[in-house]
Amino acid sequence: MLSEIISVFERLLTWFVSTFDGPLWDITTITLLGVGIFFTVSTGFVQFRLFPESLREMWFGRTTDSNALTPFQAFATGLASRVGVGNIGGVATAIALGGEGAVFWMWVTALIGMSSAFAESTLAQLFKVKNPDGSFRGGPAYYITKGLHSPFLAICFACALIFTFGFAFNAVQSNAIVEATHNAWKWQAEYVGAGLVFLTGLIIFGGVKRIGKVSARVVPTMALFYLIMAVIIVGMHIDRIPAILSGIVHSAFNFEAMAGGMFGAIFSKAMLFGIKRGLFSNEAGMGSAPNAAASASVKHPASQGLIQMLGVFVDTMVVCTCTAVVILLSDSYNSGLTNISLTQQALSYHVGEFGVHFLAFILLLFAFSSIIGNYAYAESNVRFIKNRMSFIVVFRLVVLFFVYFGAVNSGTIVWSFADTVMAIMALINLGSIVFLSPIVWSLLKDYQRQLSAGIDEPVLNIQEHPELLKRGVDEDIWS
């Protein structure tokens, strides 16, 4: 019975992706780059001009609440959550399908997208609300509701995020676990899927919260181990790095392999897959990171914008680049492999069979931790739409279905589904932050004015900005 339901759903999903993915990504690619350029120029190249300040905010910034995370702790936690399937499997897929030039377009997406990340996270901080326990929550659904006075559009965004993170991205995570563990230990997809459903169900229904706490401690350590291994491999072949980087840049402008679609004469496969996988990895402009950014306790909204901007840089320019170079230094590049299998094969080339088992183990931790994190993002938006327990229970059951669906289906359909719904979510958020851009400029100007006056830690005094109070900003938070 379950297999028949999955089969029917797979055919429905295939039709949905084949119908909407191409046109959506034609529009999303132009919008993503256009909005990034818009904020880059209108903020005076904030991602380059204030990059040193973002480092200072991350390292020396203090919290306004002794019980809250410091900016450095928040940055480290966010980076640990970013290092995962997108940095490992996503980079491999981009290279396999788009060629080595796709890495260049991942860089472009990050460097331009840093300004979009600054804008969305600054807005999320400004429009955040306080929970009864003193913590904060917020994100695009909140700044769309308050800043744009559009509850309907906010619900549309919340629905898009639920489908993207609660369903599609969780299917991607379980698919990655199955691929990695099958390559290393020959684990069967059905059993892995059933195990993931069981463990995920225990956590999201509140049964075993200790697993989540343990993973929160283990995952950052494993992320560090992966980065150390990647850096060591790069260091061992440092003489070949200039040629690798030159090949990436040269291939980026090879327009012989076109992407197709409405704008097929403009986009190459390298550009399309580089931008897709870049967005999946660093999430700049997608509208997901602001949900986490809003929970931080800071003195000025722009400071959190700078910290999230830095996270995009490290995620793509450091972590993704390390993975790409590891793959391109191996003999696996033209092997026909994609996704996790390609990265595992590359590590096996460099460090032997240990690399296959090591990556399978850390991906098991990364991806499972991401499933829980994705669920938390999605549930927050479910409660934004309708905070009713029966509604939540149905949502949780659908999440578990997608965890199993991703485990037993091919990576192609799972990734394509994720791309399609991710594009919808990104388009809503990108349009919203453009309409709210005057607020971003005002906050950035206020932040820079205080820096110029010699104030080390700028503070937002909401009484000096009565126009923001009219937008629904919580006066008590920023007084």
Image (tube, rainbow, N blue to C red):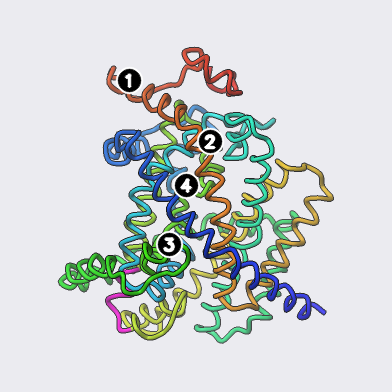
Q: For the residue carrying disc 4, how many other residues have a C-alpha within 10 Å: few (<14), some (14-19), or many (20+)?
A: many
The Cα atoms of the two marked residues, 2 and 3, are separated by 33 Å
- Give the mark toward the camera: 1 or 3: 3
Q: 69 or 334, which is in the foreground?
A: 334
**For residue 97, which quarter of the picture?**
bottom left
Label 4 belongs to which residue?
A: 285
Image position of 473 with respect to 337: above or below:
above
In this rendering, the label closer to the viewer, 3 or 4: 3
Callout 1 environment at 10 Å: few (<14), some (14 to 19), or many (20+)? few
Q: Amino acid at mark 2?
A: Ala
- Picture residue at 50% right of the left edge, 83% below the top: 184
Q: Which residue is mark 1?
A: 449
Secondary structure under tag 1 reads helix
Q: CA–CA distance between discs 1 and 3?
A: 43 Å
Please give left or right for residue 299 compared with residue 244 in the image: right
- Badge 2 or badge 1: first in the primary sequence: 2
Badge 1 or badge 4: first in the primary sequence: 4
Q: Which residue is mark 3?
A: 263
Q: Is residue 399 left or right of residue 241?
A: right
* Residue labelled with disc 2: 124
In the rendered image, residue 455, in percent from the top left (x then y), is placed at: 32, 20
Q: Earlier in the sequence, mark 4 or mark 2?
A: 2
Badge 1 amino acid: Arg
